[in-house]
Image (cartoon, helix red, strand yellow):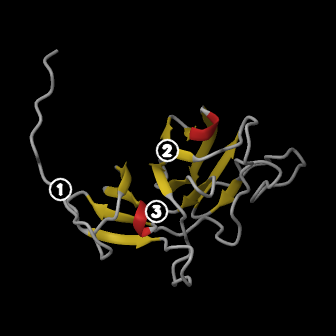
Amino acid sequence: CAPPTWRVAGGWGLVGRGVGQFESPQAIALDTTLNHVIVTDVDNFRVQVFDTTGIMQFKFGYRIMYLPTSEVAWFARSEGVAVDSCSNIYISDALMGTIRVFDSLGRELDPAHAPSVGYGTDPGDLRVPCDVTIDAGRLYVASTNNGAIEVYDVLCTNGGVAGDVDGDGDVDLFDFASFPSCTLGCSSICMNM
């Protein structure tokens, strides 16, 4: 095989705090179903979503030290981003030590609760999760300060029902005993080890 040939095909963005501007774009994920380009904008404490030509679709998130806007998400340091086959968006927040899950419009799945992530060195615990990716029903998380990769099964079904994660016989919306958790949105996300 010959090495690939590279040429600039386009791009967008300037340094700044306005719509479509960036202060440290950190990670990019493609949602090939909706033709979205999702960018974590670390020092603007938000995630911006564009179409594949660079037209801004929407943004979500705000800086934790300011009063909340009408948006439901906040980020201390949104580093990694991944998209599952149901167009749900997974954000790793390195400083908060969490993985947050949002629907395709940027609404946090069950925003009244944030899954509790163990902070430590046990399996499943996260310390400074800097990146995430999803492939074949598996969520891979780089737990940077643990020097580990955590792997979770991700069940994504359109209109499905969350399962019994903790084995008590009922359907779990959130299993706070351990992360990963189950939650319902416009589609069902279930993660368990």
Q: Residue at x 52, y 63 (%)?
A: 103
Mark 2: secondary structure: strand
Residue furthest out toward the top = 1
Is 145 displayed left or right of 115 in the figure?
left
Q: Residue 108, how many percent across, how many down?
A: 57, 67
Mark 1: secondary structure: loop
Q: What is the quadrant of the N terminus in the image?
A: top left
- What amino acid type should be assigned to the residue bearing mark 3? Ser
Is 19 displayed left or right of 188 in the figure?
left
Task: Report crowding for label 2: few under 14, some 14 to 19, many 20 or more residues within 10 A (C-alpha).
Answer: many
Q: Residue 76, how many percent across, how many down?
A: 55, 64
**How much space separates mark 3 and mark 1, taking CA atoms?**
23 Å
In the picture, the disc for residue 104 is 3
Mark 3: secondary structure: loop
Task: Report crowding for label 3: few under 14, some 14 to 19, many 20 or more residues within 10 A (C-alpha).
Answer: some
Instruction: Look at the picture and state if 69 lies above or below 179.
Output: below
**How much space separates mark 2 and mark 1, taking CA atoms?**
23 Å
Is 97 displayed left or right of 142 in the figure?
right
Q: Which residue is mark 2?
A: 131
Q: Residue at x 67, y 45 (%)?
A: 191
Q: Which residue is mark 1?
A: 11
Q: Residue 16, how many percent across, how many down?
A: 28, 71
